[in-house]
Image (cartoon, rainbow, N blue to C red):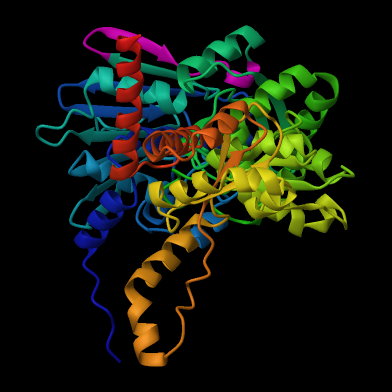
Amino acid sequence: MSTFQVDLRGMVDLLSRNLYSGPRVYVRELLQNCVDAISARRELDPQAPARISFTIEGNTLTCADTGIGLTEQEAGTLLSTIGASSKRDELGLARSDFLGQFGIGLLSCFMVSPEIDVRSRSAKDPNAPTVHWQGHTDGTYSVDVLDAVDPGVLRQSGTVITLHALPGEVWMEPDTVRSLIDEFGSLLPVEIEVRSQGRTTHHGNAKAPWELPREQQVRWCRENLGFNPSEILEIEIPGSGLHGLVAINPDGVSTNDSRHTVYVKRMLVSRSAQGLAPKWAYFARVVADADYLRLTASREQLADDDLLHDTANAVGTGIRTWLERLAKHAPGTFNEFVASHAVGLRSVALTDDYMLDLVSKYVPYQTTLGPRTLVELAEMDKPVRYTRSVDQYRALADVAASQELVLVNAGYAYEDEVLGAFMRNQTVSGNSVNISLVDPGDLLDAFQNASPAEEAEALDLMLVAARAINPADCEVVLRRFEPATMPALYLPDPDLAERQVAKTARENADSIWQELLGVTDPFANSRPPRLVLNRANSLVARLVAVGSNEKIASQVLRGLYVQCLLAGRQPLGPKERAWAAQALGALLDMALQG
């Protein structure tokens, strides 16, 4: 039977350079191995010293710890077997008290050094010898025991790792090493020294953000998260050993920008961790330490497993409790939060029932009665209609209000979709919701017809209107409606996109349907937009009186048409822009003559 041929050098290079995000993690891996070793020794001797030292001389870095050390057998097993978790179990190093994986962790050092030199003395035996392990990037290694007279012999239990910087690399420069130690290990409960060029600095044993007074927590969030939190929540989740804080961002942020800062055993894992809070809580940043959450192989992210999901749900429960308490006891602050995050909350509500319920209760819509929530609209005993565009709402709001019809603006981001989700979810909305899409034709049908005498009087004006404004583009009709101060109203089609499709199809198919099928164009009955002239308005009454003067009537009609388009923020074509210029020119001419 044939066996696979494994290129050890290629395997080492693949794991060391592709498992990790970059060379900088080698400092974290050294720290983790040291902390693991110190934790193991303190199980044997709780009074054992807890010290880590880095010494930098030229292009050589030496990392020493006062940990449990290794025997010759352990050195060969732990340092030379990649990913052998069963071996770690046999040696008692796979419990949650330990951070890293000795063998895999050392691989990261090959990104900055062509060889790794390890000298270690076990604390399990007072007479233990010094074991020397040396590994190379070609996949070879050697393990031997140093003679008692060898200058490399260790006098105390622990481990010393020596690296030699690759040519041109900066990762072992003293300032770089100090900076990386502060980033990854500032919270570690051990003494860390860095010696170089006669200068010694001390690191570690710093207070975590969640251990600081509130004023310092706010400053930490501003400096590290980039915002002043509107609220800081304390979290404690025994199941995953998570404890820390949740900072609430007061500003509107992307719902995909959920980056959390996570430590494990006070060692920084990531400042951009995913999955520590539910997706709906995009405005929250978790900063916490965890004892039992598992890490990926590179130990730069949290493993996506059931424990992480349970932890995120528990964090979400804490945030829900805060939101509900805020809404009940500090409605002003809650309203400010809702206003700032309205778009994000609505977007998340489309996929999360809890957020849909919260948005329905607390996030207001613009209506003709003022701001109203979906729950308040659903409880009304009068018809409620909504528009899908802001422009249509602006065009119809006054007319709808005059008819005691509640009109809702669902034209902003995600409002239409959330309203639809609300009406479909009977658990949130209830069984009977009298909310539907507005049909401008319904408003027109509710208008009062002009009297027969008024219609006869306006006959000339209507004929002029048909010539001044193409009925295929806009149909001009005469009605009476409130408010009387509004001279005209532009009613766009309920579905403008569908009308445009129908119009294009009609223009391309007019002759085809008649010639080939002998029938009328099926799109011919598509309803065009309407310009409704208000006979109750004094300007329109005067316009009717001069209706026989086609030049003046056409100019006024086109001016009203353009005015309505602009008021409703409808697009102006070349023809409408020309009419607008003519109307403005006429006004300027009159001003100069007067």
Magenta residue span: 196-211
Viewer-proximal residue, 2 or 173?
A: 173
Regarding residue 127, the answer to whether it shows in the image is no
Q: In the rendered view, tell whether residue 491 sits above or below residue 249.
A: below
Quarter-wise, where is residue 362 in the image?
top right
Report the residue at 41% width, 48% height from top: 469
Q: Position of residue 311 (x, y in %)?
A: 68, 45
The total number of labels drawn is 0
- Image quarter of the N terminus: bottom left
Q: Position of residue 390 (x, y in %)?
A: 56, 39
Quarter-wise, where is residue 235 in the image?
top right
Regarding residue 2, the answer to whether it shows in the image is yes
- Image quarter of the C terminus: top left
Quarter-wise, where is residue 319 in the image?
top right
Report the residue at 82% width, 57% height from top: 426
Q: In the rendered view, tell whether residue 48 sits above or below residue 96.
A: above
Q: In the rendered view, tell whether residue 582 sits above or below residue 137.
A: above
Q: Position of residue 359 (x, y in %)?
A: 72, 40
Report the residue at 24% width, 45% height from top: 110
The question of residue 457 being in magenta is answered with: no
Viewer-proximal residue, 119 or 534?
A: 534
Report the residue at 82% width, 51% height from top: 429
The question of residue 207 being in magenta is answered with: yes
Q: Is residue 507 left or right of residue 271?
A: left
Name the outermost residue toward the left: 167
